[in-house]
Amino acid sequence: MNGGHEVHELPITELGTLLRAGAVTAIDLAEHTLNRIHAIDGRIDSFILVTAERAMADASRADAELAAGVDRGPLHGIPYALKDIYATAGIRTTCNSRLLLDNIPAEDSEVQTRLARGGGVLVGKLNTAEFALGGGTDLPFPQARNPWNTEHFTGTSSTGSGAAVGAGLVRLAMGSDTGGSIRSPACHCGVVGLKPTYGLVSRRGVYPLSFSLDHCGPITRSVADAAVAMDVVAGHDPGDPSSAAHSVVDHTADLALGVEGVRIGYARDLFADTPGVSPEVVASVDAAAHLLAGLGAVVEEVRLPDFDLFKACGRIIMLAEAFAIHEDTLRSRPLDYGRYTYQRIAAGATLSAADLVQAQRLRRELTVELNNGPLAKYDVLLTTTGLAPAARLDEFPRDWPPPGVSVAVQTAPFNVTGNPALSVPSGFSASGMPMGIQLVGRPFDERTVLRVGAAFESAVGVSHLYPRLDPAEHVT
């Protein structure tokens, strides 16, 4: 369409330029997106629900508004999709659970409100682990599959968000991240995932897993796309008690500045000697550190607090809060949960008030140590997102806790501390599966994280690559 590129291969900003020039319409974009979903999604099961009529209505309105001189901003006329834990007024929101198969919210989540206000075109609701926690094959909708190899996992738990963006069905999908569930599927599906600072993006109307660990954020094709999305969805929401009253910034402003003089702490110890880490992952992140230094950044190794402390702290808080959320239905409708989900959430019943208090105390200590230590000296921290490329689906455990590590990611520390963290593709394993680096910043300094991510993305040169997916045979 433009320089030989298909519509879905163009950045959001470039699509916006074409829309405003009249070279393409929002209806064109919506039809292209719906056609790709129709042709391809039967291979990867990234969507729970395709909202075709809503998409065409949104697109028609976007075109009419642009024709009338009404411009709602960078996402005006752009297709997007939501993880199916985001409430959508009049549209079923299931959390991939039998408990909510008939759930039709009366109101939109705040994120959906902002995306609609920004002129976006909603094309559907995306697959998710049950209640953003449990997996397995006994759920109402089939597991999402990795577009780079459909026998492999997408990462937890924004499974459809990672798969849909990775396959080029949409350039923007909203996910959620309690222990890594934006960054993990982004890494494993070869795309970009941003977990913003805790409280920067409203969680109102998003089904909670853990009140104090949940983050909402974008999974996108590029760092620039993530920055554009943040300009629309970020900002204080008085209706969300956890929302931060922080001034809104232009997240795209520093993307072209490069990394000359930026101080980067390379947290190699967080993963390099961890059991189960892939040598290919270690080599990939080492190469990323070398590349960033070559671009002019000051890169030095730095030690972070013990990963196991972060992991234990986050797990106790998550299980305690998840049990508090689900206690009533665990007692009244236990058989309506998936097996794996039930086992994980029910484990929260074994925790005491003292366990939670001690975990919250440790959380404060770890947060202070991270921000007053390494992040007082360095602008950004570099580490890995995952320990290994995506596992096969048939390796996913039937029961919890699993006998071994099934989805090995190094993301939980920054849910505990609430710092912004970005996963950016770093290349591919010998088996052809994506790998990614993780960049971590100071609270509310998404701009620097995105700046470094954009420089790395441009230099490593893999963001333009798409998996080859033939049309699904069973799609009609």
Image (tube, grey):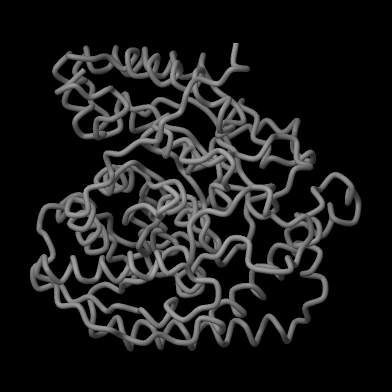
Does residue 274 appear in the picture of this structure? yes
- State the image quarter where residue 179 is shown: bottom right
Asked if residue 235 lies left or right of residue 346, the reply is left
Eyeballing the image, is 406 above or below 100? below
Viewer-closest of 46 and 443: 46
Number of numbered discs: 0
Eyeballing the image, is 361 above or below 102? below
* Identity of the residue drawn at 62% across and 54% down: 208
* Identity of the residue drawn at 50% across and 62% down: 242
* Identity of the residue drawn at 42% across and 29% down: 169
In percent of width and height, residue 231 lies at 29, 46
Does residue 237 appear in the picture of this structure? no
Asked if residue 349 lies left or right of residue 16, the reply is right
* Identity of the residue drawn at 42% across and 47% down: 432
Viewer-closest of 118 and 341: 341
In percent of width and height, residue 256 lies at 11, 52
- State the image quarter where residue 360 is shown: bottom right
